[in-house]
Image: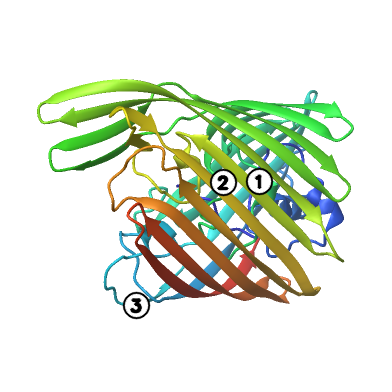
């Protein structure tokens, strides 16, 4: 599960230089992630007069204070309640839940320094969401990276497997279940090919330390090498297309009683995504992702370990697939809505416990108003359905009202 999140002044995602999506659409003043937020932050830096004395370094320190009012039909299972996780939908009786949260409040640093090799960009982002999504309100480093001349990126930022410009502007912190938006430690190289084409490749942090068990059986997965990710991207006047791939290696240890056995699996994933300008300033984004052993790259979790038992009684990696489609519409220069749906599902090629999750469906629609240049208000309705391997389904719904005040 990823921690993606909000910031109208969110840091640049740094997959490549500022994407062309910002060129064909109106300023995405409500953006919390992705290309719209990147363009907005870069614009603010260009307009900033802040310079470190004695240097040519321009910098911006900015962020926002946000209060979210959350009313949920059924209180989610687990500790995390401040973001809508379809995987946490209760299958039994549950009370409703109402709460206020300030956890999306955020602080950012962005600086640019000219060097003989090109501009050196430094980016940092903190908010109040624990990276473990354990329900605690604590200062958490979400992003920290350096970028040299739009060619080399090092630090914690969006994975090369992720398309930051396919992330919809939701008010919900985590976002659509079937979307990929992981941020992790990496080193990435970016090479422009000309005529709108760009290729990028990265060596990235591998996370696969999951554990699940029942009675006398326990299954644990561990990463055995860094993840290797790459993407090929094409930018054109009305949008972009991106094809991404990732390769992983994980070790699965099964413990039965006092005995344990280990197997090594090679996982891989493929994703195709893009954006397209439609009518006026409207636009849509879409993504389809599939692969074995890549469950952690999705915004929600459908399996604790990512493995199941095949017909031959041997462990098999589970194939996870997700699709997302969202549309952004401007009612007025200061009024916008974003609506769409996403689904994440696991293949039936391997047997898992009957109460394990097989499919998640996430849908949302919002309306956001820029009341003042520094004050945004918005409301969002969310609905989710979780289906287990035994065919039993459960649904949940939430209304979120948000007030965000920008500070600099």
Kindly identify which residue carries mark 2. 181
Give percent across and percent down for residue 168. Answer: 65, 58
Q: Residue at x 74, y 61 (%)?
A: 28
The answer to which of marks 2 and 3 sits earlier in the sequence is 3
- Residues 52 and 73: in front is 73
Where disc 2 sits, the SS reads loop
Q: How is the image coloured?
A: rainbow
Kindly identify which residue carries mark 3. 96
Give percent across and percent down for residue 24. Answer: 86, 55
> Badge 2 local density, few (<14 within 10 Å), some, or many (20+)?
many
- Residues 390 and 147: in front is 390
Where disc 1 sits, the SS reads helix
- In three-dimensional space, the C-alpha distance between marks 1 and 2, rounded to whole angstroms, equals 7 Å
> Badge 3 local density, few (<14 within 10 Å), some, or many (20+)?
some
One can see residue 274 in this view: yes
Kindly identify which residue carries mark 1. 164
The answer to which of marks 1 and 2 sits earlier in the sequence is 1
Residue 29, by quadrant, is bottom right
Q: Residue at x 68, y 39 (%)?
A: 14
Q: Residue at x 45, y 41 (%)?
A: 296
Q: Is residue 330 left or right of residue 246?
A: right
- In three-dimensional space, the C-alpha distance between marks 2 and 3, rounded to whole angstroms, equals 29 Å
Outermost residue, front direction? 311
Q: Is residue 21 left or right of residue 164?
A: right
The answer to which of marks 1 and 3 sits earlier in the sequence is 3
Tell whether label 2 touches label 1 (CB within 8 Å). Answer: yes
Give percent across and percent down for residue 360. Answer: 46, 56
Q: Residue at x 27, y 46 (%)?
A: 353
Where disc 3 sits, the SS reads loop
Camera-side mark, 1 or 3? 3
């Amino acid at each position: 599960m990823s921690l993606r999140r909000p910031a109208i002044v969110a840091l640049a995602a740094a997959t490549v230089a500022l994407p062309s999506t910002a060129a064909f659409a109106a300023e995405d003043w409500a953006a919390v992630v992705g290309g719209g937020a990147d363009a907005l932050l870069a614009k603010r830096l260009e307009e900033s007069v802040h310079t470190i004395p004695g240097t040519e370094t321009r910098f911006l320190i900015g962020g926002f204070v946000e209060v979210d009012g959350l009313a949920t039909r059924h209180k989610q299972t687990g500790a995390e309640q401040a973001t809508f996780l379809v995987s946490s939908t209760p299958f039994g009786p549950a009370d409703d839940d109402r709460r206020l949260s300030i956890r999306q409040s955020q602080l950012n640093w962005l600086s640019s320094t000219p060097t003989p090799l090109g501009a050196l960009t430094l980016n940092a982002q903190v908010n109040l969401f624990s990276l473990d999504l354990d329900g605690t309100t604590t200062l958490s480093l979400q992003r920290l990276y350096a970028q040299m001349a739009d060619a080399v990126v090092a630090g914690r930022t969006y994975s090369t497997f992720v398309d930051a410009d396919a992330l919809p502007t939701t008010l919900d912190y985590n976002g659509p279940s079937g979307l990929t938006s992981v941020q992790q430690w990496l080193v990435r190289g970016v090479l422009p090919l000309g005529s709108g084409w760009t290729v990028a490749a990265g060596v990235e942090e591998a996370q696969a330390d999951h554990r699940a068990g029942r009675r006398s059986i326990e299954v644990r997965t561990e990463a055995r090498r860094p993840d290797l990710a790459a993407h090929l991207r094409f930018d054109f006047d009305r949008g972009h297309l991106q094809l991404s791939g990732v390769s992983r290696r994980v070790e699965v240890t099964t413990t039965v009683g006092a005995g344990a056995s280990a197997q090594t699996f090679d996982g891989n994933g493929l994703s195709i995504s893009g954006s397209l300008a439609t009518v006026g300033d409207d636009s849509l984004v879409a993504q389809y992702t599939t692969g074995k052993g890549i469950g952690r790259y999705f915004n929600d979790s459908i399996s604790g370990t990512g493995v199941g038992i095949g017909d031959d009684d041997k462990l098999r990696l589970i194939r996870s697939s997700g699709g997302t489609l969202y549309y952004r519409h401007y009612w007025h220069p200061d009024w916008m809505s974003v609506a769409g749906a996403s689904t994440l599902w696991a293949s039936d090629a391997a047997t898992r416990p009957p109460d394990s999750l097989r499919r998640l469906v996430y849908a949302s629609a919002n309306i956001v108003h820029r009341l003042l240049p520094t004050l945004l208000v918005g409301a969002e309705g969310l609905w989710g359905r979780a289906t287990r391997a035994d065919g039993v389904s459960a649904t949940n719904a939430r209304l979120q009202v948000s007030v965000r005040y920008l500070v600099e």
